[in-house]
Image (spheres, grey):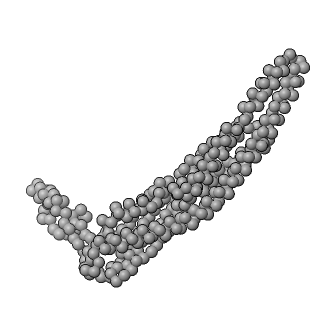
């Protein structure tokens, strides 16, 4: 299934205790690059939110921002990092004993060290437990991802229509290359035979052997194998687009393979129109490659 990697979603869940907002922005990226921005009071929820997004999205640079506005003013919850403070105090005591510094460790000194104190918001209204708030944030994030996916599916439908039209155009171009190559092979055989007859008038030549050699030379321009593989890639493309799994990276690989087959056709086939058709096919493949960079 073709889905775009770009999208945006934003929603708010509001009640008497708090207003929870979730915003998700997604743009193109080779892999899934997830960035979460949460209030300090919800830091413990980050692993669960990260797992939620990873379960729903396969590719893209995704930014998830969560905001919480409490109806009651939250009180700070301050925790002392005792091992760090004790180690710091011991070091300072040694420095005083050595005459390097004077004075003792004060509360102001502790505030200068972010490792010494852990400060988080703690609700005081009694009506909303941290677990309940986390559940609301999780639900809001899940609904925001639903909105994001809906947008990505809608944009993916436009991408699919464009790519489908270009795929059909490629199939026609390859059919034209086959016809031009067949005409070129016949013309090549004719030219070789005419040249051989000219030489035969002055040099004794085994006509049967000559005819076989001409056919062998002309067969070197045969592109039937490349055409068969190319058409197989087109069929595989359609199967991937109709499947339920993200297919962007697989489509990108198929385009590389199709481009390789087209290059081989251009180097083997003979004919006045072949080069022009090969250029058109490569240009179409490049346009498809640019579009596929937007597919999840």
Q: Residue at x 49, y 59 (%)?
A: 60
Residue 18: which quarter of the image?
bottom left
Residue sticking out furthest to the right: 201
Give 144 or 34, whichever is nearer the viewer: 144
Q: Residue at x 54, y 54 (%)?
A: 247
Q: In the shown orientation, is residue 288 left or right of residue 72?
A: right
Q: In the shown orientation, is residue 71 left or right of residue 94?
A: right
Q: Quadrant of the N terminus?
A: bottom right
Give 265 or 224, whichever is nearer the viewer: 224
Where residue 189 appears, x then y in whole percent? 81, 31
Q: Is residue 33 above or below residue 123?
A: above
Please indicate, yes or no, whether residue 101 appears anywhere in the rendered image: no
The number of numbered badges drawn on the structure is 0
Please indicate, yes or no, whether residue 67 appears anywhere in the rendered image: yes
Q: Residue at x 79, y 27 (%)?
A: 214
Residue sticking out furthest to the left: 97
Where residue 19 appears, x then y in whole percent? 37, 78
Give 15 or 233, whichever is nearer the viewer: 233
Where residue 87 appears, x then y in whole percent? 15, 57
Where residue 39 appears, x then y in whole percent? 34, 70
Q: In the shown orientation, is residue 70 left or right of residue 105?
A: right
Give 1 or 82, whichever is nearer the viewer: 1
Q: In the shown orientation, is residue 214 left or right of residue 29?
A: right
């Amino acid at each position: 299934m073709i889905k775009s990697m770009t999208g945006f979603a934003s929603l708010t869940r509001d009640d008497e205790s708090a207003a929870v907002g979730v915003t998700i922005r997604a743009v193109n990226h080779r892999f899934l690059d997830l960035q979460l921005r949460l209030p300090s009071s919800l830091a413990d929820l980050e692993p669960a939110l990260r797992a939620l997004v990873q379960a729903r999205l396969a590719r893209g640079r995704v930014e998830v921002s969560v905001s919480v506005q409490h109806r009651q003013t939250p009180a700070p919850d301050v925790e002392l990092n005792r091992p760090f403070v004790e180690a710091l105090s011991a070091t300072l005591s040694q420095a005083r004993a050595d005459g390097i510094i004077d004075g003792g460790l004060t509360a102001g000194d502790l505030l200068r060290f972010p490792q010494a104190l852990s400060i988080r918001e703690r609700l005081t209204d009694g009506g909303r437990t941290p677990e309940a708030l986390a559940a609301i944030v999780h639900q809001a994030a899940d609904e925001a991802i639903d909105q994001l996916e809906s947008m990505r599916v809608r944009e993916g439908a436009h991408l699919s229509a464009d790519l489908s039209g270009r795929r059909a155009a490629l199939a026609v171009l390859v059919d034209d290359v086959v016809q031009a190559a067949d005409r070129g092979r016949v013309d090549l055989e004719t030219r070789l035979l005419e040249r051989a007859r000219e030489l035969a008038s002055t040099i004794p030549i085994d006509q049967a052997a000559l005819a076989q050699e001409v056919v062998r030379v002309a067969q070197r321009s045969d592109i039937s194998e490349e055409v068969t593989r190319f058409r197989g890639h087109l069929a595989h493309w359609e199967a991937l687009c109709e499947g339920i799994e993200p297919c962007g990276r697989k489509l990108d690989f198929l385009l590389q393979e199709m481009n390789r087959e087209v290059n081989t056709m251009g180097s083997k086939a003979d004919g006045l129109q072949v080069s022009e058709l090969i250029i058109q096919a490569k240009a179409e493949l490049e346009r498809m490659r640019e579009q596929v960079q937007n597919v999840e």
